[in-house]
Image: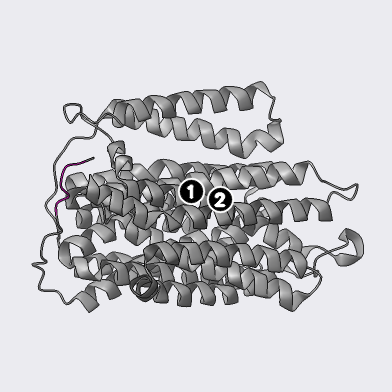
Amino acid sequence: MTAPIAPARAGTSRTPIAVIILAMAIIETLSGVTQGYLTPLLPALGPVIGIDDPGINGLFLISNVSFAVMTPIVSRLGDSYGYRLVLRWSTVAVALGAVLMAALPSLATITIGLVLLTCVVGFIPLMMGILRTTDDSRTRSGVSVLIGVLMISVGFGGLIAGIVGAENPVTGFWIAVPVAALALAATFALPDAGVPSREPIAIAPLAACSLGIIGFVVALAMGPEWGWADVRTLASGVAGIALLALWGRLDGAPSGARRRFLDLSMLRIPRIRSITIATFCFGFATISYFGTNGLFLHADPATAGYGFGLNPFDIALVVALTSIASFLASLGTSRLMSRIGEHRTLLTAGLVLAAGFATMALGHTSFPLYCAGFTLLSVALGMYQAATRALSVEGVPVDRTSAAAGLNELALSVGIAVGAAIVRMISAASVTDAGKISEGGLWAIWIVLAAVALIAGCVGAGYRRGAAQEAAA
C-alpha cells in the first residue's frame, strides 16, 4: 500500500481529554468485569439451572465463538456509523445481557446473555476511534490506561463474583448490573468524534468471515472432545478455512471498486502486518495458559505429583493479585515505547513472557517461584496488550481506525483459540491414570508457549523495519 496515510484530524471536542479517558475507563471496567466473572460463575451454574458439564463447556464455546464473530462486526460498524453511537448501543446490549442473566437465569437466557455480553469486544476499538479523532497525541497513553483498567477489572471482577456467588452463582451475575449502568451513563460524557463514512457493509464477505470463524473456532475447541479425525471436526475445520480463504479473497484485493467488510489490504502495510502476527502469537502464548494455570494451582501434589492444592477462592486471589502487575505494566508501556522504541518494547514483552514460563517450569515445585513466573506472564500481558492495540491503528487512515483495531482484536481472539487448542491437545496426549495432566505434559506446554513467546517478541522486533519499508514505499 503506497497511498499516503491520512493524518489524524485535530480534536474539536470541548470535553477535557482527562474527562474523556475517565469515562472510557468506566466503560472498560464493564468489559473487564463481564469477562472476569464468567470463569468462576459458569462452572457453578450446573446444579442451579440443571445443566451438566458438557453443557457448561458448550456455554464457554458459545462465548468464545461470539467473541471472535462480534469483533470485526462491531468494529466495522463504528467506522461506518459513528464511534460513540455504536459504543453506546454496544453498552446497551451488554447491560441487557447482564440484567437478563441475573434476573431470569435459565439455559436460554444465559445463552442469549452471553452473546450480548460479547459486544464488549468493540469497546476498545471504538474508544480508540474517539481518542484518535479527538486528540491523536493521547492515543497511546489513553490505550495504556484502558488496558490497565481491563486487566485489573478482569482479575478482581472474577474474585468479587466468586465471593458474592459462593452459595448461589446467579447472585454473582448482579455485580455487573450497576457497573453497566455507570458505563452507559459514561457514554454520554464522550464526544461525538469523527465523521462516519456511511459506507455500507458488504454482506458476502461479512458472511464468509463470520461463518468461517465459527467453523474454525468450533473445530479447534471441540477437536480434543470429538477427536481430531472425527468427521465433525474435519468438516467444521475445512469449511471454516475455506470460508476464511474466500473472505480473504473478497476483502484482500487492492482494488477499491469492490465493497468490503474489513479492508484486509491494510495487512500490506508492513508495520500493521508485524503487529497483527505478533498479537496472534502473544494471544497464543498468554491467555490460552490461564486454564492450565488453574489446574496446576488446584492439583494435589500427593496425587498428581505437582501443584499446591489451592481452592477456587485462593486461585482467584492469585489471579487478582497478579493482575496488579498487568495493570502497572500497561500504564508504563506508552512511556517505555517512547524511551526504548516500539520494537524493543515488543521484544522485551516476548522475552519477559518466555522468562515467565521458564521460571514456572524450573520452579514449579516452589509456590513463590511459580507465582513469580506467573507474575512475569502478567507483566508481559499488560505490556503487549497496551502496545499492540495502540500500534495497530498508527499506520492506517483515520476513517479505518476502528476496523484496524478490530482486525488486531480478531488476531488476538484467533491466537487464543489456536493456543488453547494446542494446549488441550498436549493435555489430552499426556493424561495419567488418575485423569491428570502428566508432569511431562506440563513441561511440553511450558516449552511450547515459551517458544511462541519468543517468536512473538522477534516478530514485534521487526516493527521498526516494517515502518521503514513503508516509508520507503
Looking at the image, which residue is at 63% across and 66% down? Answer: 355
Q: Say if 39 sits above or below 141 in the image.
A: above
Tag 1 secondary structure: helix
Query: Label 1: few (<14), some or many (≥20) within 10 Å?
Result: many
Q: Quadrant of residue 232?
A: top right
- Is residue 176 at least partly visible in the picture? no
User: Most extreme residue toward the front, as rendered?
Assistant: 472
- Find the distance from the CA under tag 2 to the CA under tag 1: 6 Å
Residue 380 left/right relative to 28: right
**Residue 283 counted in the magenta span:** no
Tag 2 secondary structure: helix
Q: Amino acid at mark 1?
A: Phe
Q: Amino acid at mark 2?
A: Phe
Q: Are marks 2 and 1 in contact (CB under 8 Å)?
A: yes
Residue where numbered disc 1 is placed: 280
Q: Quadrant of the N terminus?
A: top left
Q: Say if 206 sits above or below 292 in the image.
A: above
Looking at the image, which residue is at 63% across and 67% down? Answer: 356
**Residue 4 counted in the magenta span:** yes
For the record, the magenta segment spans 2-6
Residue 56: give x, y in percent of width and height: 63, 47
Residue where numbered disc 2 is placed: 284
Query: Label 2: few (<14), some or many (≥20) within 10 Å?
Result: many
Looking at the image, which residue is at 47% across and 58% down? Answer: 103
Residue 122: give x, y in percent of width and height: 34, 53
Q: Quadrant of residue 165?
A: bottom right
